[in-house]
Amino acid sequence: MQVSQGTDSRTNNAATTVDFVDERGAPIKLLVRRFTDEDFSTLDEWVRGQHVRTARASLGPTSTPEERDEILGLAMHQAASMTWMHGLGAHMIASMDGIAMLVWVATRRDHPDLSYERIRTLIFNPENIKENIRRWNDKMEELKRQGKSSSATERGLSGPDKRADRRRRAKTSTAASRESTGGRSR
């Protein structure tokens, strides 16, 4: 997948081209647009539905009606306040299925016959994944040359994930120093 540079679509909702290859290696150009309020609602509904579907799928054949009611009730209560931009919803959107949903929502106005399943197939195509990894690595190298990289940036972390990563590394460092000093503080 490659995004072409062009008119600033943030100001006029002009389409930006995203290039994929299909299963046979044939190029596919898709137009993507900035999200509308309707798109934001669609993404919120998707993460809420995914949450409830996951809860429903966790129920086994031996689940009692009470367990079923409790699990689904809790899932629906949690889903009611979920959004694709925060918390568990953001984690769901960061998955391959979530990325496919983002691309599908951004392309559906210009490609109404293109299904979510087709976008998902393109996203999961190993050639498109390899191209994205190559482009990510190129971008990281560019940031390093500019002196703008950090270990969290190299792992693709930002915001709360970056802070959590920093805390995890500090704990690991503290544990290692305790181990090396036999449990004594330095």
Image (tube, rainbow, N blue to C red):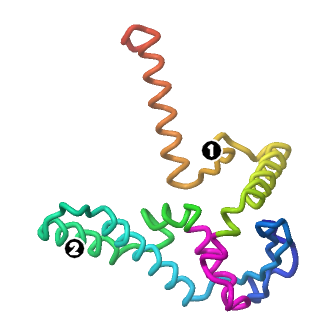
Q: Position of residue 143 (x, y in %)?
A: 79, 48
Which mark identifies residue 73? 2
Mark 2, secondary structure of its residue: helix
Main secondary structure of the magenta stretch: helix
Q: Residue at x 36, y 12 (%)?
A: 183
Question: Which residue is tagged 1?
Answer: 152
Q: Is residue 4 left or right of residue 96?
A: right
Label 2 environment density (alpha carbons within 10 Å; few <14, some 14–19, many ≥20): some
Q: Position of residue 52 (x, y in %)?
A: 34, 72
Image quarter where the N terminus lies is bottom right
Q: Residue at x 44, y 81 (%)?
A: 45
* On screen, residue 159 above or below 70: above
Q: Residue at x 78, y 58 (%)?
A: 127
Q: Is residue 153 magenta?
A: no
Mark 1, secondary structure of its residue: helix
Q: Magenta part of the protein: which range?
A: 98-120
Which mark identifies residue 179? none
* On screen, residue 96 above or below 84: above
Q: Is residue 100 magenta?
A: yes
